[in-house]
Amino acid sequence: MQRIKHLAITGGTHGNELTGVHLLKHWRNNPEEICRDSFTTELHLANPKANQCNRRYLDEDLNRQFGWDDLNDHALCGYEQNRAKSLNTLLGPKDDPRVDFVLDLHTTTANMGVTLVIKTDDPFLVGMAFYVKQKMPEVTLFFEPAERMADNFLVSLGRHFGLLVEVGPVPQGLLRWDAYENTRQATLHCLDYVQQVNETGELPELPEVQSGFHFVRKVNLPENERGELTAMVHPNLQDADYQPIKPGEPLFMSLDGKAIPFDSDRTLYGAFINEAAYYDRHIGLSLMEPVEIKLNRTGR
């Protein structure tokens, strides 16, 4: 199995998600915590201006700017679009990256606990997620394979698809110890995993299959003809991420207190429920379906 030589940890991709920002500060002052013998680890504050302003972004969501076509479109010149090009120069270029692997640290206002976003079926990355879940059984796996060059997430910049760590609930612009410590522990387990694979040349003993969730679609909050919100997430659904939502169960509550049911022909599961960051697009939640994620040890 190919060795990882250069790994980058990024935080503050969204400037008001402070867990990753402050973990970077901690690790700069305590580098021995993230030091491993078989590879080098770099620390990068992804969106410094948005962080200074305590905003998710200034012009555009940075974590949607890393598609190959966008990185090469110089007509896209907003702050985050230029910042993505700078990160591509620093960590990439995407078609021949200097860095092998990116760990990108995020928080959510939704009650999603520790969620690992897996963007490929590559056994190295799937194995990493399984390893972290083995150490932290409460972890949820979010499986959404994509093509690396076309993918627009920061974790697509490395030679191999990286891992996005998402922890919540945490209000925007706020530090919360449990989220901070869970993110720290998950990251250190990732580093231990890389060290172990580099040393042995093979994956550790892991389950062949783990349960997870796969994205189906986003659901917008109800609005009127003027684009004004007319309802909110139903109280039964609030904080119930990764729980089943059956057809006909209440999904939203109108401003005058009337329940709006889930219009579907099958049971699905909610995630990013009432995520504050998505209110600019009036998105109320994402719908997920259960999936069995397989570790194909011969796939790399």
Image (cartoon, grey):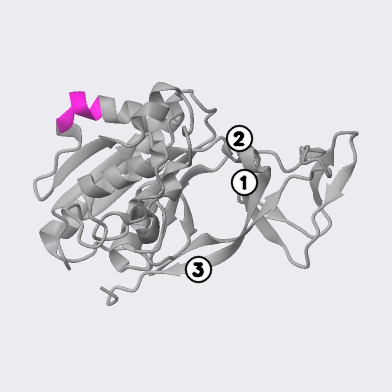
Residue 42: x, y in percent?
A: 19, 40
The residue positioned farthest toward the bottom in the image shown: 298
Amino acid on which the number 1 mark rests in the picture: Asp
**How many numbered discs, if any?**
3
Does residue 36 sit above or below 98 in this rendering? above
Decide which of tag 1 and tag 3 comes sooner along the chain.
1
Q: Which mark is residue 276?
A: 2
Residue neighbourhood size for the residue with mark 1, other residues' Cα within 10 Å, grouped as few (<14), some (14–19), many (≥20): many
Q: CA distance from mark 2 to mark 3?
A: 29 Å
Q: Which residue is at a point 74% across and 45% down the rendered structure image?
A: 221
Residue 37: x, y in percent?
A: 9, 46
Q: Which mark is residue 116?
A: none
Decide which of tag 2 and tag 3 comes sooner along the chain.
2
Quadrant of the snapshot with the C terminus = bottom left
Q: Quadrant of residue 227?
A: top right
The residue identified by callout 1 is 241
Secondary structure at badge 1 equals loop
Amino acid on which the number 2 mark rests in the picture: Ala
Residue 12: x, y in percent?
A: 38, 34
The residue identified by callout 3 is 292
Number of the front mark, 2 or 3? 2
| Residue range (magenta) | 26-31
Q: Is residue 29 magenta?
A: yes
Amino acid on which the number 3 mark rests in the picture: Glu
Secondary structure at badge 2 equals helix
